Image: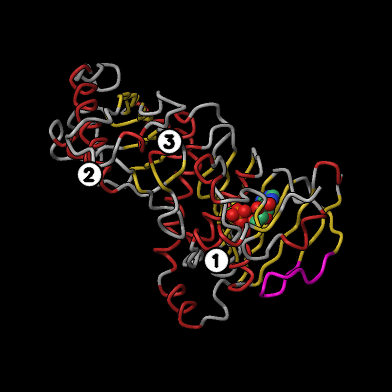
Amino acid sequence: MATIKPIEGRSVHQIQSGQVIVDLQSVCKELVENSIDAGATSVEVRFRNNGLDAIEVQDNGGGISPEDYETTALKHYTSKLTSYDDLSSLQTFGFRGEALSSLCALSNFHIVTARPADGPRGTKLEFEQSGKLKATSVVAAKQGTTVVVEKLFHNLPVRRKELEKNIKREYNKVLQLLNAYACISVGVKFTVSNLVPKGKKIVAFSTNANSSTRDNISNVYGAKTITALIPLNLEFEMDPSNKSGATRSAQNWSTQEDPGSAKVKIVGHISRPVVGEGRQTPDRQMFFVNSRPCNLPQVAKAINEVYKSYNITQSPFIFADIQLDTNAYDVNVSPDKRSIMLHDQTALLENLKEALLELFEGHDQTIPQAQHP
Ligand code: ADP
Ligand code: MG
């Protein structure tokens, strides 16, 4: 049975999708999210010439069914959401059916896909710029999907030039984002490599299919990083009647069917609140909402502020996943879904600061002799 279906017109309108692919980072974000949505336990990202020549993302996920080939890259076709009402209970990263269609328009694009039942044979899918399927052919392939994006922005000379000019910075930005996906994705093996022009392949980083975020962080940043971290494990109840900055009514926080939904957990890892244990710059800070990597500048500011009251000269390593009811935020704020609106942010920040102070206070701030002779 075909699973990729059009989103109904009403929803298309409500979603008001903008342009999804704006830079190298958005390409990688969309493709990696598709791989995770496909249930992959292995994701390999291969850059050629820092991504200027090509970006390939290969996974071992469920693959694409032949019934879905025709619609795979059509705009607003998705296997993940059929109505706007589904958004609140969304479990997948994707839901707009826009990334692949945008990539067809902006690059030389093709897919190779094989489902478990397909054996060693896969299918190469080629598309027109509109996203319409142009040709299929049988190729050798392992189970999963490989998406190949060549010559990004080749038909938009100004953007292409801009990309070429800033490629080093863009590439580093991508690596930071991929670090975040690799650290949060428990049970998924990530490998990121770059084939530089002289033919040398550089492995940027790789993780094993670890069972904890701690091990993922250790793989990405090195085992030494881990010793300077303490577990972040904050939990508080958002009081819907709390006037201290609570700008929304109770029903936005807790639905009638689910009275417990005002609970917020913030889990992860943070530098010990001790001088010498932080970092020179705030370059290793990752934020997630229900495991979705996102930009949370206010949350970042709050955590950094509390940390500074213990260690004024340094910034902490932060890996913070805010776990809360899906009604308590909106992912549909920016086309790239990196910006998330937390409905009751002010109250959340206050609770967060209080809980973090408590954690730091309760923490033994002396440095173990064994690690710091
Ligand atoms: P969305 O992720 O919002 O559904 P995309 O344009 O990113 O939209 O992808 C369109 C569809 O193509 C997805 O809904 C999914 O069914 C299929 N697809 C994309 N990438 C993969 C992949 N790596 N493995 C399996 N299916 C994929
Ligand atoms: Mg997608």
Quadrant occupied by the C terminus = top left
* Label at residue 301: 2
Q: CA distance from mark 2 to mark 1?
A: 35 Å
Q: What residue sits 54% from the left and 32% below the top?
A: 186
The secondary element bearing badge 3 is classed as: loop
Residue 293, relative to residue 213: is it above or below? below
The answer to which of 268 and 4 lies nearer the viewer is 4
Question: What residue is shown with label 3?
Answer: 222
Q: Position of residue 218 (x, y in %)?
A: 45, 33
Does residue 87 lie above or below 270 as drawn? below
Residue at coordinates 64% horizontally, 41% vertically from top-left?
42
Q: Are marks 1 and 3 in contact (CB under 8 Å)?
A: no
Q: Quadrant of residue 105?
A: bottom right
x, y (%) of residue 41?
64, 37
Please name whichever residue, 81 or 228, is drawn nearer the observer in this view of the structure. Answer: 81
Which amino acid, mark 1?
A: Asn
- Secondary-structure class at tag 1: helix
User: Left of 257 or right of it: where is 122?
Assistant: right
Write the residue at 45% across / 26% down. 258
The answer to whether residue 130 shows anywhere in this view is yes
Q: Earlier in the sequence, mark 1 or mark 3?
A: 1
Q: Position of residue 143 (x, y in %)?
A: 77, 45
Q: Is residue 127 magenta?
A: yes
Q: Position of residue 136 (x, y in %)?
A: 83, 65
Relative to 245, 262 lies left or right: right
Q: Residues within 10 Å of mark 3 (few under 14, many from 20)?
A: few
Q: Gap between marks 3 and 2, in whole Å?
A: 26 Å
In the rendered structure, which segment of residues is drawn in magenta? 126-136
Question: Which residue in the rendered view is the most extreme toward the bottom?
Answer: 157
Look at the image and tell me whether residue 58 can be seen: no
Which residue shows up at 44% across the image and 53% down it? 332
